[in-house]
């Protein structure tokens, strides 16, 4: 269908027929991005940057912005807005911005530079990302991401980020899952750390210049709304316990993802959803919460008392071959004693075109299938072997041990330290684990939530990855949002600033602060028998079992009932030691777990409503004859944006239809 802007609509708006979640939610008004661009897709971002209003340098010095989070998105945004002259307050709960979880990203960052002359382009990066996300992302946002990707590399090289280089001195690239070109720039296995140091030093330069004020060991516990606009936050000093009020003209949340709702994940132990969830309870929509990513290459669970899982970079799938024994009776053997003809290189067998480089969701589900068949390897945890082999024998024979060490040395060393096994001599053992979330707070094309003045960047928003994130795209999105997108969109909002001055005596400010103090007092006064950790672990078990790699109507209904029982128990049997006026990690954890419990219920309702399989969301009722994910575009080609329904009410679902004009929706195939 031809549109007025000269483009052609390639799909029909969805009409949902099935309703598995009937009775669990209320249907709200349809949602439309009010600032979505039109016209040819390659011109949309350029046109929008020009159309957005400017703020002159003298006025910027009068305007203030709060940024929560100092990872790649938050650190880059603070550095860029500070450089522009705005007054920035930067908050993180770590003791240094350099400890943000972005540091843990290992494998690389994507950019459409086509240095390998292998057919890459902005359009191909756009296509791969939309396809990899199973056609559940906005095309305008994804094209913008692909368009600015090349600028990120230039920016980081100028900062001194030590990307790997070829013999001639040019930047090197490697492949990642879901693509057939080499577009991933990397710094051995510590790309996230090096990029974060680049953003950190850029931000510290602005700290020294006086445009950025830094607050470490501070946790945001509430957002302040004045006349419906975000005007500040309530934060707790985690060292002294002091409750503080911070006011500004706009607030940016760059607080990361919520993967720790599963308890066991690759996320840092402190990663949480509290900043985003506090905003959600104040009216910000939470979009696609069921879209969580299971990473295929993690060190397997080793026992009952584990509290953290370790990621092994997806870049290892460039040279490592994934296999399991063909016969279950061989699973206890030393893998070196299993002959080639008795090995099942199942990804190469099932997906010959992509092999070991299929997207993460597909690689994860197939690893689960192999273990469910009884062909998992490694020690039993309970009565189940959770592991498949990632074997570098062929790569070592081809490149030599020194060649592998040059590319992956710190990753191999990390594996050896954790497992006590030498991966140069025996294959690594890997198994899928929760890693990243594609869901997050709903934002428009300008990265502004439905609350005016509240912007959301990086993993904390939902905007760019659809139902599945391709490897090396998280760093790309974080830096794109922080360095190039947000600074060009927030100025259109701030063109109306500075807004009316408010102080801490304003009734809405007092109410927000009182809510925080009351909540803390409640945690301390319950005086039950169970720690917050015990509730978190129980929640994680429920989420992994019923809302993990495979979901079903029956399982999700059971999970919702179990979470509601857990929530009731939490608020009557929680035990928080210590007091509020000092360092108290037990109190910190209680607040985070309370938010995780509410989020977990919404995730299950969202997953129950979406009776289709797409990307990281796999419904058992919706699969092809050979077990692949089966989408239903005619019903579910929409963003599910959930509105808080109150403590005792139902969440309200607002649907934003996904309309494509530049790419045709197809069932994914990597065969």
Image (spheres, grey):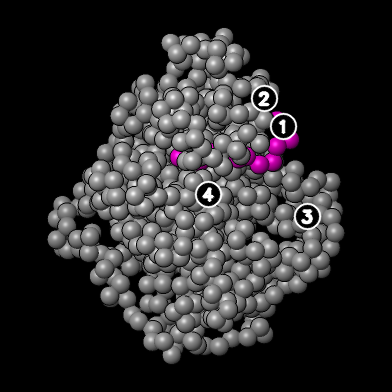
Q: Looking at the image, which residue is at 65% across and 71% down?
A: 215
| Residue at the disc numbered 2 | 381
372 is higher (above) or lower (below) than 281: above
Q: Which residue is mark 3?
A: 586
| Mark 3 vs 2, N-terminal side | 2
Asked if residue 278 can be seen in this view, the reply is: no
Nearer the viewer's eye, disc 4 or disc 2? 4
The CA distance from mark 4 to mark 3 is 32 Å
Q: Position of residue 564 (x, y in %)?
A: 65, 44
Magenta stretch encompasses residue 39: no
Label 3 with label 1: CB-CB less than 8 Å? no
Which residue has dot 4 on it? 190
**Residue stretch rendered in magenta on the structure:** 302-315
Q: Nearer the viewer, residue 377 or 633?
A: 377
Image point (56%, 20%), residue name:
376
* Residue 643 numbered mark, or none: none
Quadrant (top left, top right, bottom left, bottom right) of the C terminus? top left
Q: Distance between the Cα atoms at labels 1 and 4? A: 29 Å
Quarter of the image for residue 54 reads bottom left
Q: Quadrant of residue 618?
A: top left
Instruction: Report the residue that reaches farthest toward the front.
Output: 168
Q: CA distance from mark 3 to mark 1?
A: 22 Å
At horizontal 44% and vertical 53% (from top left) the residue drawn is: 163
Pick whichever of labels 4 and 2 is earlier in the sequence.
4
For the residues bearing labels 3 and 2, Cβ distance under 8 angstroms: no
């Amino acid at each position: 269908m031809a549109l007025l802007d000269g483009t052609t609509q390639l799909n029909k708006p969805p009409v949902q027929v099935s309703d598995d979640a009937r009775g669990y939610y209320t249907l709200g008004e349809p949602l439309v991005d009010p600032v979505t661009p039109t016209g040819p897709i390659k011109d949309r971002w350029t046109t929008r940057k020009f159309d957005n209003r400017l703020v002159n340098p003298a006025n910027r010095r009068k305007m203030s912005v709060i940024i929560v989070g100092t990872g790649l998105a938050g650190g880059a945004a603070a550095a860029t807005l500070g450089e522009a002259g705005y007054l920035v307050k930067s908050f993180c709960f770590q003791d240094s911005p350099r400890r943000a979880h972005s540091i843990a990203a290992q494998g690389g960052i994507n950019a459409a530079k086509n240095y390998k002359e292998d057919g890459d382009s902005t359009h191909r990066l756009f296509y791969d990302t939309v396809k990899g996300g199973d056609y559940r992302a906005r095309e305008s946002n994804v094209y913008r991401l692909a368009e600015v990707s090349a600028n990120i590399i230039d920016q980081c090289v100028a900062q001194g980020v030590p990307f790997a280089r070829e013999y001639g001195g040019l930047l090197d690239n490697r492949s990642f899952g879901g693509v057939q070109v080499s577009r991933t720039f990397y710094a051995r296995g510590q790309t996230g750390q090096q990029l974060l140091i680049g953003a950190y030093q850029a931000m510290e330069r602005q700290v020294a210049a006086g445009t950025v004020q830094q607050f470490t060991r501070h946790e945001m516990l509430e957002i302040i709304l004045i006349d419906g606009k975000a005007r500040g936050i309530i934060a707790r000093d985690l060292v002294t316990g002091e409750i503080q009020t911070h006011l500004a003209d706009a607030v940016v949340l760059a607080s990361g993802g919520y993967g720790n709702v599963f308890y066991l994940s690759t996320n840092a132990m402190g990663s949480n959803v509290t900043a985003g969830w506090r905003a959600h309870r104040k009216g910000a929509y939470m979009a696609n919460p069921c879209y969580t990513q299971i990473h295929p290459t993690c060190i397997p669970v080793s026992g009952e008392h584990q509290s953290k899982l370790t990621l092994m970079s997806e870049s290892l799938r460039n040279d490592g071959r994934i296999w399991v024994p063909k016969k279950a009776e061989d699973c206890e053997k030393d893998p070196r004693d299993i002959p080639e003809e008795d090995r099942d290189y199942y990804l190469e067998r099932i997906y010959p075109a992509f092999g070991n480089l299929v997207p993460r969701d597909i690689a994860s589900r197939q690893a689960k299938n192999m273990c469910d068949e009884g062909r998992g390897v490694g020690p039993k945890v309970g009565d189940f072997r959770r592991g498949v082999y990632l074997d570098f024998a062929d790569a070592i024979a081809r490149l030599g041990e020194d060649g592998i060490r040059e590319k992956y040395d710190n990753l191999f060393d990390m594996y050896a330290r954790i497992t006590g096994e030498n991966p140069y001599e025996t294959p690594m053992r890997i198994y899928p684990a929760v890693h990243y979330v594609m869901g997050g707070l709903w934002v428009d094309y300008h990265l502004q939530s439905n609350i005016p003045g509240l912007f959301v960047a990086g993993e904390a928003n939902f905007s760019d990855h659809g139902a599945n994130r391709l490897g090396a795209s998280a760093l790309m999105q974080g830096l794109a949002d922080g360095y190039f997108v947000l600074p060009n969109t927030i100025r259109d909002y701030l063109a109306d600033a500075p807004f009316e001055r408010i102080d801490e005596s304003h009734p809405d400010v007092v109410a927000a602060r009182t809510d925080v103090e009351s909540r803390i007092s409640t945690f301390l006064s319950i005086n039950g028998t169970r720690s917050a950790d015990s509730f978190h672990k129980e929640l994680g078990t429920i989420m992994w079992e019923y809302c993990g790699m495979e979901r079903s109507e029956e399982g999700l209904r059971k999970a919702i009932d179990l979470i509601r029982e857990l929530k009731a128990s939490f608020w009557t049997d929680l035990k928080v030691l210590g007091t509020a006026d000092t360092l108290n990690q037990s109190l910190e954890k209680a607040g985070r777990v309370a938010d995780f419990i509410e989020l977990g219920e919404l995730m299950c309702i969202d997953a129950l409503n979406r009776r289709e399989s797409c990307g990281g969301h796999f419904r058992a009722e919706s699969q092809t004859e050979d077990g692949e994910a089966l989408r239903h575009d005619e019903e579910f080609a929409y963003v599910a944006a959930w509105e808080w329904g109150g403590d005792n009410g139902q969440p309200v679902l607002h649907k934003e239809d996904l309309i494509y004009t530049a790419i045709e929706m197809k069932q994914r195939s990597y065969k």
